[in-house]
Image (cartoon, rainbow, N blue to C red):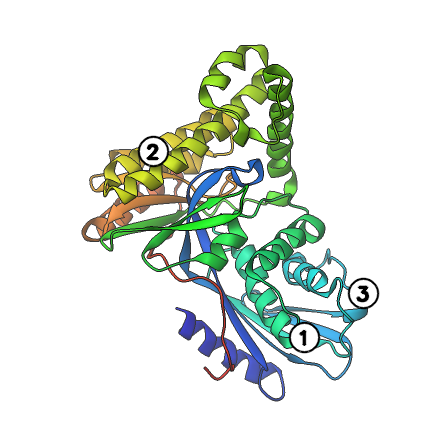
Amino acid sequence: MQSSLLETARAQWTRRFAGGPAVAAYAPGRAEILGNHTDYNEGWALSVALNRGTVFLAAPAADTRCRLVACDMNEETVFDLRSVAPSREHPWSNYARGVLAMLLRGHPLPSSGFDALLLGDVPVGAGLSSSAALEMAAGLALADLYGIPIGTLDLARAGQAAEHEFAGTRCGLLDQLSSLHGRRHALMLTDFRSLSVRTVPLDKDIRFLLCDTQVKHNLTDGAYNERRAQCETAAREFERLLKRPVAALRDVSWPEWETHAAEMDPLAARRAAHVIGENQRALDGAALLEQGDPDAFGRLMFASHASSRERFENSCPELDALVDAAHAAPGVMGARLSGGGFGGAAVVLTRKRDAQAVGQTLAEAFRLRFKRTCPVLEIEPGDGATLLHGADA
């Protein structure tokens, strides 16, 4: 997928710019498999890098202007390197603008801007983190273009800061770290307190289907930030009730929730129940995969979605219908929403031999219920972001 994207992007570059690109980078999208809204609660999550992503090409400009072309949308924007700011007219560009602004902090201002082109094949608004794919690809390419040394964790944090300061979403680091640390035939178990990432091997027979509801979630509209604020409120309540430091919901056990939930604001208690349960499901899920028990892992996925639906209330009718259909479909081991929620995609666990039939069954169930199509993508876990040394590679 990466090579065909790069080939298409290079052809688009030739149509728009004189000369060739000086740098090229690729970064994948991601699917969250277990651990919903746990990253900013300093918990654990299991995720996978997709075999779909974004290619970002760039070359120095003759002046301080920065020209950014998005082939997917046939749009472009121009801004000055000396005053990098968010754009209301081209919000898609804020992920690249934001990463650039973070890279430049603490470094001398370069003497030239850049021409850049991006092309991706991650469905936008499907909860598969097309934004993080853009941030990480842009970050790798622009850091190389300007000779700015940056480590993996700092690059992830630059993408997170771009989301916070330029896009208006107070996200955690799940998307960026997943895009950077992806491995073929493996999931990633991330500890969001230590920010360590451990690879969890996956049987090569396992497949994930991504069923895109085409309900375009927009995490900048307030619902995501509202859930984060509710989790922070719950953590403060637990600190008061437990009479000990509670930096985040990670610090609260399930028995402690059971003991004190009735003393809390009901909404805060429900939100906390989801996060505390998700942390345990992510840890249990990693252990089950390492023990070679994908069926039990799948049951955790179903439980995760039920918690999202009932406790965190970040699902939607389309996602619920897909997961219900998956529950009844032969060959399905598990299913749940993926990502921030409020729309986007459901991720379904199946085996290679069943993937095609399962995909057809779910797409048809969705069509009958909602009278429209539901694209189904079969994915295999892919490698993480990389700088493509020499754009001719």
Q: Nearer the viewer, mark 1 or mark 2?
A: 1
Query: Residue 253, position in %: x, y?
Result: 48, 24
- Give the residue number, with chain letter if any, for mark 1: 146
Residue that sits furthest to the bottom in the current view: 19
- Give the residue number, with chain letter if any, for mark 3: 83
Residue that sits furthest to the right in the current view: 82
User: Which kind of residue does numbered mark 1 sit on?
Assistant: Tyr
Residue found at x 62% / y 28%: 230
SS class, disc 1 = loop
Of callouts 1 and 2, the N-terminal one = 1
How much space separates mark 1 and mark 2, taking CA atoms? 45 Å
Packing grade of label 1 (10 A; few <14, some 14-19, many >=20) is: some
The answer to whether residue 377 is visible is no
Query: Residue 68, position in %: x, y?
Result: 65, 71
* Residue 300: mark in rendering: 2
User: Which kind of residue does numbered mark 2 sit on?
Assistant: Leu
Task: Identify the image quadrant of the N terminus.
Answer: bottom left
Vertical arrangement, residue 293 with respect to residue 383, above or below: above
Packing grade of label 3 (10 A; few <14, some 14-19, many >=20) is: few
Which image quadrant for residue 284? Answer: top left
User: Which kind of residue does numbered mark 3 sit on?
Assistant: Ser
How much space separates mark 2 and mark 3, taking CA atoms? 48 Å
